[in-house]
Amino acid sequence: MATIKQIAEIVGVSSAAVSRVLNYDEGISVSAETRKAIFETAEKIGYRKKVIYPRIENVVLLYWISSLDELEDVYYQSIQDELKKQAKKTKIQLTVITKEEGLEAVPSETQAFLAIGWFNRKELKQLYKICRKGVFIGTSPDEKLFDSVRPNLDSFVTQIVDYFVERGYKTIGFIGGMDRNIDTGNPVMDVREWSFRQSAEYYGKLNEEYIFITDRYTVTAGYETAREMIRRGNVPSALCIASDTLAVGVLQALNEAGIQIPNQVAVFSINDINVARYVSPPLTTFHIDIPLMCETALDLLRKRVLSGGKITKAVFINGLPVFRKSC
């Protein structure tokens, strides 16, 4: 492992000088050439400055997912597990509070929060009164009030449609679920459906007969929706599916009906949960980098606690397609 002492010996200066330069100490008097040599040497020999995290206490993790959702979509549980792991490493004390416990369980001394799941307007207002320093992960219910980190679902779907069009698929369908209005709780169009409609229309491929929307993002919902699609005879040559949990059910229904994947129907999904590589056939899907999302969320929280500030940030995390045998 490269050290400050090694850099000092190579450049010909003291270890103290190297340390102060690498820590951007403007009070040290060294020439521009020496400063440049120190940074170049550090990069050349692979020096990595040790990060010292300040301890942050009284942070709550609001896990606003029902027990049924948690069982059927491991995506949320994966985020919670990764947040807890990274928080422990970076000296952030986390206390988990579930939706069943309610916001009444949030301690009055809470200085910041992380949030996973769906919150209505009433809950957001109550939360803002309790604590104004918060980061939502996976959603962004009110960008005026709170920071957020979420996967770039709009871009994922656009890239999937581009992929299908570039490879000459004649009919492209979509299976997805609904979002909810933050004020009324009523179903509204999800961003993935909106993106699919925009992209498909751009290419002249938008056909309502090939769009199927269910009320939940679950394996069962994917299975039942695909069976209905097959029953109607509206099976496209390519399917964009909003999440892996839906896709697992869709694959099951297609396999039962003897529809060959990908020869008759190509399937492309989003999330890359662990089971995606083990289904039949293995699922082509967009990988969402959960560790990166959690790292970004904790960075935002740390800056909010330590530095304050009035301007909120909304960060999109891009993903990479993982090609398997369903495409």
Image: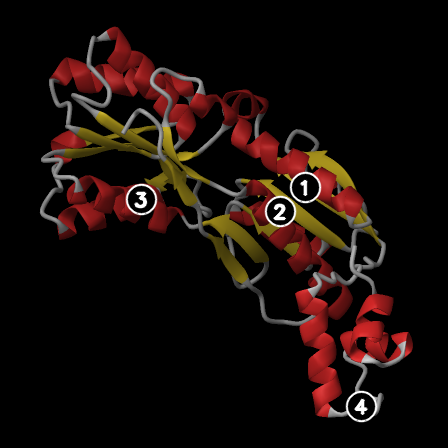
Observer-side mark, 4 or 3, equals 4
Describe residue 303's horizontal placement relative to residue 4 as left or right. Answer: left
Q: Element type at marker 2? A: helix
Query: Which residue is labeled 1 in the image?
Result: 83
Q: Amino acid at mark 4?
A: Val
Question: How far separated are the C-alphas under marks 2 and 3?
Answer: 22 Å
Q: Quick one: label 1, few (<14), some, or many (20+) residues within 10 Å?
A: many
Query: Which residue is labeled 4 in the image?
Result: 30
Query: Mark 1 or mark 3, which has the lower sequence index?
Result: 1
Query: Mark 2 or mark 4, which has the lower sequence index?
Result: 4
Residue nearest the observer in this picture, 317 or 311: 317
Q: Position of residue 280 (x, y in %)?
A: 35, 15
Question: How far separated are the C-alphas under marks 4 and 3?
Answer: 52 Å
Q: How many marks?
A: 4
Q: Element type at marker 4? A: loop
Q: Amino acid at mark 3?
A: Val
CB-based contact (under 8 Å), mark 2 and mark 3:
no
Where residue 294 is drawn, which disc sits there? Answer: 2
Describe residue 292's horizontal placement relative to residue 245 as left or right. Answer: right
CB-based contact (under 8 Å), mark 4 and mark 3:
no
Residue at 13 percent of width and 42 percent of height: 206
Describe residue 221's horizontal placement relative to residue 204 as left or right. Answer: right
Question: Can you say whether 127 is above or below 285 in the image?
Answer: below
Position of the N terminus by quadrant: bottom right
Q: Position of residue 187 (x, y in %)?
A: 36, 38
Q: Amino acid at mark 2?
A: Cys
Q: Amino acid at mark 1?
A: Leu
Observer-side mark, 2 or 4, equals 4
Residue 207 seen anywhere in this rendered image of the structure: yes
